[in-house]
Image: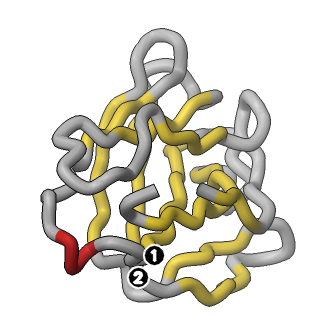
Amino acid sequence: MVPFGAGCAGTFGIPLLAVTSAPSLGNAAFGLQLAQLVPHALGFLGLSFARAPQGLGPSCTLYLTSPASLLGSSANGNGVAGYTLPIPNNNALLGVRVFAQGAAVDASGSYLNQLSFSRGLDLMLGQ
């Protein structure tokens, strides 16, 4: 997993997108978490099979093209939202690249004073 790009800040800085377990085949509990959010705010995780930067004004960039999946979750009291994504044990998925980016509702967000965005994350399944 390799972070890329720049995020755009919210109340507690740029949201941090990280994996909580390896994206290995057959991992029923593969997870990502989005941290540094406003406590109890709504967070989003976008996943795509391709990336292409799209400017969202002077300070924010969306890195995903045609998200294959968009998940929502409320942050806990510490400002962390979690997402569990089971990965099938299918050798056809070995080496598939998936790109992820998080966003969160934030009244101090850099995007229209409504959203903050994490950096992108480049994941390769099976590693």
**Residue type highlighted by circle 2:** Phe
Report the residue at 41% width, 75% height from top: 95
Q: Which of marks 1 and 2 is nearer the N terminus?
A: 2
Marker disc for residue 76: none
Residue 53 drawn at (x, y percent): 68, 84
Please indicate whether residue 17 sits to the left or right of residue 10 in the image. left
Q: Where is residue 64 in the image (x, y as percent from the top left)?
A: 52, 78
| Circles 1 and 2 in contact, beta carbons < 8 Å | yes
Residue position for label 1? 97
Q: Residue at x 52, y 53 (%)?
A: 102
Residue extending furthest toward the top: 77
Give the percent coordinates (x, y) of residue 7: 74, 56
How many residues crowd around disc 1 within 10 Å: few (fewer than 14), some, or many (20 or more)? some
Which residue does the numbered mark 2 point to in the structure image?
Answer: 49
Outermost residue toward the right? 58
Q: Residue at x 41, y 26 (%)?
A: 75
Q: How far apart are marks 1 and 2 (CA)?
A: 6 Å
Q: In this view, does 74 lie above or below 17?
A: above
Q: What residue type is labelled 1?
A: Arg
Q: What element carries label 2?
A: loop
Snapshot quadrant of residue 89: bottom left
The residue that appears at 37% across and 32% down in the rendered structure is 82
Q: Nearer the viewer, residue 121 or 60?
A: 121
The N terminus appears in which quarter of the rendering? bottom right
Callout 2 crowding tier (Cα within 10 Å): few <14, some 14–19, many ≥20: some
Helix, strand or loop for disc 1:
strand
| Image coords of residue 106 (percent x, y) | 58, 40
